[in-house]
Image: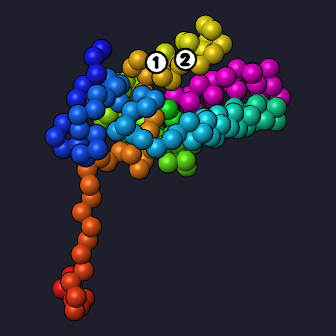
C-alpha cells in the first residue's frame, strides 16, 4: 500500500508529511505517544484476569468430586469463553479490555482509525487463537490488518476549544 497524505483538518505539524498506510503503525505521527510498555502491561493484566477465572474453574471442580476429572477441560473452556467475551464483546462496547482501560489504551482499525466492529474483533480473536494453537505463539500485533492499539490521548487530532470564563459571570451566566 502506498502512504496517504493528511487531510486539511490535520494539525499543521503533520501536513505534507507522508503517513503510514496503517493507522497506529510504529512511527505513525497521528499517534505519537509511546505505548509499547503500556501494551505489555495491558496484556499481563488481561492474561491474569483470564488465568484467574480458569484457576477458579479448576478450584471449583476440585471441590466437587464428580467434576474433578474435568478440571483441565473446565480451565480451558472457561479461559476460551472469558477470552472471547472480554476481547470481542467488551472490547466492542468500550474499545478496550480491562487491561487496556487501566493503562489508557484503545483499539482502532488500522485501515481508517475507527472503532472496530464486532465481526472484525471476532475475526482477529479467531486468528489469534488459531495462530497460538498451531505455532504456540501470538501473531505479530504489527501485522497488516491486526487491530492497532493507541493511547487515549492520541485519539483526537482536532484541537479542543478552551472554555472561556467571562469576567463577572455569576451562576448560569457563564
Which of the pair 29/93 is nearer the observer? 29
Position of residue 64 measured from the top left corner of the image (x, y, whole percent): 80, 33
Residue furthest to the top in view is 134
Residue 139 badge = 2
Is residue 64 shown to the viewer in this render? no
- Residue sitting at 16 percent across and 40 percent down? 8
Q: Which mark is residue 143?
A: 1
In the rendered image, which quarter contains the C terminus?
Answer: bottom left
Q: In the rendered view of the protein, which quadrant contains the N terminus?
A: top left
Confirm whether the magenta stretch covers residue 156: no
Residue 16 in the image, given as x and y percentages of width and height:
23, 34
Characterize the magenta stretch by its predominant secondary structure.
Answer: helix
> Percent from the top left, x then y, of residue 63?
82, 36
Camera-nearest residue between 46 and 138 = 138
Question: Colour scheme used in the picture?
Answer: rainbow
Task: Where is residue 80? Give x, y as percent.
Answer: 59, 25
Q: Secondary structure at mark 2?
A: loop
Tell me where the magenta segment starts and ends, as one range.
Answer: 64-84
Q: Is residue 167 left or right of residue 154?
A: left
The answer to the question of whether label 1 and label 2 lie on touching residues, with beta carbons closer than 8 A, is yes
Q: CA distance from mark 1 to mark 2?
A: 8 Å
Q: Residue at x 41, y 50 (%)?
A: 153
Q: Residue at x 57, y 41 (%)?
A: 38
Amino acid at each position: 500500500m502506498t502512504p496517504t497524505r493528511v487531510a486539511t483538518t490535520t494539525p499543521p505539524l503533520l501536513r505534507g508529511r507522508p503517513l503510514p498506510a496503517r493507522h497506529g503503525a510504529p512511527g505513525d505521527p497521528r499517534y505519537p505517544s509511546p505505548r509499547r510498555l503500556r501494551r505489555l502491561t495491558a496484556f499481563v493484566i488481561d492474561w491474569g484476569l483470564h488465568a484467574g477465572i480458569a484457576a477458579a474453574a479448576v478450584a471449583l471442580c476440585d471441590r466437587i468430586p464428580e467434576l474433578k476429572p474435568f478440571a483441565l477441560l473446565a480451565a480451558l473452556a472457561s479461559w476460551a469463553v472469558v477470552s472471547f467475551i472480554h476481547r470481542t464483546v467488551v472490547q466492542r462496547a468500550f474499545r478496550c479490555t480491562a487491561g487496556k482501560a487501566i493503562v489508557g489504551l484503545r483499539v482502532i482499525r488500522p485501515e481508517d482509525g475507527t472503532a472496530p466492529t464486532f465481526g472484525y474483533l471476532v475475526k482477529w480473536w479467531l486468528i489469534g487463537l488459531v495462530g497460538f494453537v498451531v505455532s504456540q505463539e501470538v501473531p505479530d500485533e504489527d501485522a497488516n490488518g491486526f487491530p492497532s492499539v493507541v493511547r487515549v490521548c492520541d485519539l483526537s487530532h482536532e484541537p479542543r476549544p478552551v472554555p472561556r470564563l467571562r469576567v463577572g459571570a455569576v451562576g448560569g451566566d457563564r
